[in-house]
Image (cartoon, rainbow, N blue to C red):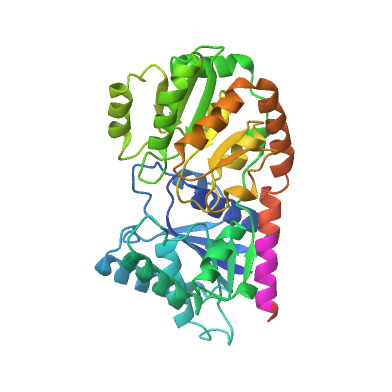
């Protein structure tokens, strides 16, 4: 098959990692794959280097950026359209909000130009642009655009059942056009044991004692990622437990704000910031910790949850979007969004009980091994393509 994937930018992120794994495996299976993307600009770091020496082609559209900009968006739309006219793909598969809109409208405008039913149009929902933490008018705007794009979409792939439920509940698409394919993780790095020496060296780098209990959070330091709830919880837990530390992995525009807040609360010795780490360091950061905390208020299905489970670590997560599809009483603890009391109680339970941590971590590893395997995800996606082409 001739397949074109379109994504807004190759920053460090779950949607981007998912897309790169998909392109890589589809190309390895003999398909002709092209990835169209915008420039990897932003404080989140970039994944563009991961496209090098792969069997698929990459085309960068300079004006394809995340922020809404009518001029740049119009330029990008026509560039995408020209590229699709030249490439004549069987499948156009879009990812992320901006690329999802521009790519699907461009592809739909070309249907039947080189084949009566082509290109077939697929969109992956990694997360939804509308959510309860922004204004109603903005949500209505995003929902209206997504409804229009859905009419130009032959099939949807959701990274969690929750994404399908939320989209169809507001009239985006039709249930029969949705299928779930959990976002793949290159599992080898997370399943491979990491030596005690490397873990202790990592802890020492950030001033964390060898025998401490470490609660790690891997998320951009942006709005709605929930660091403020973790800091509030840490303020209470640090009085109860002397030997507990918190590790914030990531960077973002709220980094200085949170560092200042931590200093004001007298928690600078307890809460450590690593800044941005390359993807290759994430397994080490998790393995060097004891519990993973994830308090984002909106997420498709955070990759850091199954990543922690693959490392044999229990997780505590806010009960949002797809989290409950991997987090349960056998793998960790779900707590109510923004509920610091529940968060503190769940953390205390795991801090106090090493045997419980080990049991939850081991169960979690077995639970997600197959569920998030790259081959499983791409098998599902490839089957969607085949079904569309058969029609």
- Residues in magenta, as a range: 380-389
The location of residue 253, given as percent across then percent down, is: 30, 40
The location of residue 25, given as percent across then percent down, is: 64, 54
The location of residue 165, given as percent across then percent down, is: 57, 65
Q: Is residue 329 visible?
A: yes
Q: Which image quadrant for residue 178?
A: bottom right
Q: Is residue 290 visible?
A: no
The location of residue 340, given as percent across then percent down, is: 45, 36
Most prominent secondary structure in the magenta stretch?
helix
Outermost front residue? 341
Q: Is residue 384 magenta?
A: yes
Outermost left residue? 71
Q: Is residue 62 magenta?
A: no
Q: How many marks?
A: 0
Above or below, 95 relative to 291 = below
Above or below, 248 relative to 12 = above
């Amino acid at each position: 098959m001739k397949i074109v994937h379109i994504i807004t930018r190759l920053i460090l992120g779950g949607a981007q990692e998912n897309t790169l794994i998909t392109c890589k495996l589809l190309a390895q299976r003999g398909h002709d794959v092209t990835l169209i993307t915008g420039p990897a600009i932003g404080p989140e770091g970039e994944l563009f280097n991961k496209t090098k020496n792969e069997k698929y082609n990459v085309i960068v559209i300079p004006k394809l950026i995340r922020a809404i900009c009518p001029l740049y968006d119009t330029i990008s739309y026509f560039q995408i359209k020209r590229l699709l006219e030249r490439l004549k793909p069987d499948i156009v598969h879009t990812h992320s909000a901006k690329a999802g809109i521009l790519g699907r409208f461009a592809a739909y405008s070309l249907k039947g130009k080189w084949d009566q039913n082509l290109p077939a149009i697929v969109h992956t929902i990694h997360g939804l642009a509308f959510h309860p933490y922004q204004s109603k008018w903005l949500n209505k705007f995003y929902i209206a655009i997504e409804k229009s794009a859905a009419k130009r979409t032959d099939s949807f792939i959701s990274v969690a059942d929750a994404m399908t439920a939320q989209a169809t509940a507001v009239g985006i698409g039709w249930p029969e056009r949705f299928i779930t394919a959990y976002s793949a993780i290159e599992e080898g790095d997370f399943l491979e044991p990491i030596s005690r020496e490397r873990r202790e060296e990592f802890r020492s780098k950030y001033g964390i004692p060898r025998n401490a209990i470490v609660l790690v959070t891997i998320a951009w330091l942006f709005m709605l990622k929930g660091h403020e709830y973790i800091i509030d919880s840490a303020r209470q837990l640090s009085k109860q437990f002397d030997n507990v530390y918190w590790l914030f992995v990531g960077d973002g525009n709220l980094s200085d704000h949170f560092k200042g807040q931590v200093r004001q609360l007298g928690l600078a010795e307890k809460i450590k910031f690593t800044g941005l780490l390359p993807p290759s360091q994430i397994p080490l950061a998790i393995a060097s910790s004891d519990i993973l905390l994830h308090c984002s208020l909106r997420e498709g299905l955070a990759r850091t949850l199954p990543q922690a489970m693959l490392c044999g670590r229990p997780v505590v997560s806010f009960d949002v979007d797809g989290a409950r599809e991997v987090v349960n009483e056998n793998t960790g603890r779900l707590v109510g969004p923004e509920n610091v009391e529940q968060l503190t109680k769940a953390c205390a339970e795991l801090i106090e009980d090493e045997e419980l941590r080990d049991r939850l971590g081991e169960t979690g590893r077995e639970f997600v091994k197959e569920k998030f395997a790259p081959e499983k995800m791409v098998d599902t996606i490839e089957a969607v393509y085949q079904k569309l082409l058969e029609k």
